Amino acid sequence: MPSLQPHISDHSSEHNPPPSPSMRRKLRDTLRKYYKEA
């Protein structure tokens, strides 16, 4: 959407920062646990 303003995207990225490597690792471990239990 080209109508989005830059400050809006900055605001959203501020509240939703990119996941850090450790966070991704924890997410992956959690998914693996759920798959194992399924």
Image (tube, rainbow, N blue to C red):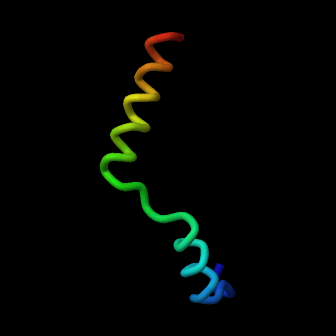
14 lies above or below 19:
below
Is 6 displayed left or right of 26 in the figure?
right
For the point 35% across and 55% down, which residue is it? Answer: 20
Tally the marks: 0
Horizontal and vertical percent for residue 33?
A: 44, 20
The residue lying toward the viewer, choosing from 38 and 11, is 11
In the rendered image, the residue lying farthest to the top is 37
The residue lying toward the viewer, choosing from 3 and 16, is 16
In the rendered image, the residue lying farthest to the right is 3
Give residue 5's quadrant in the image: bottom right
The residue lying toward the viewer, choosing from 17 and 6, is 17
For the point 68% across and 87% down, which residue is it? Answer: 3
5 lies above or below 17:
below
Give residue 11's quadrant in the image: bottom right
Horizontal and vertical percent for residue 4?
A: 66, 84
For the point 50% across and 20% down, which residue is it? Answer: 34
Is 11 displayed left or right of 31 in the figure?
right
The residue lying toward the viewer, choosing from 17 and 38, is 17
Give residue 26's quadrant in the image: top left
Quadrant (top left/top right/bottom left/bottom right) for the N terminus: bottom right
29 lies above or below 37:
below
5 lies above or below 23:
below
For the point 38% across and 45% down, which residue is it? Answer: 24
Horizontal and vertical percent for residue 19?
A: 42, 55
Is 13 displayed left or right of 2 in the figure?
left
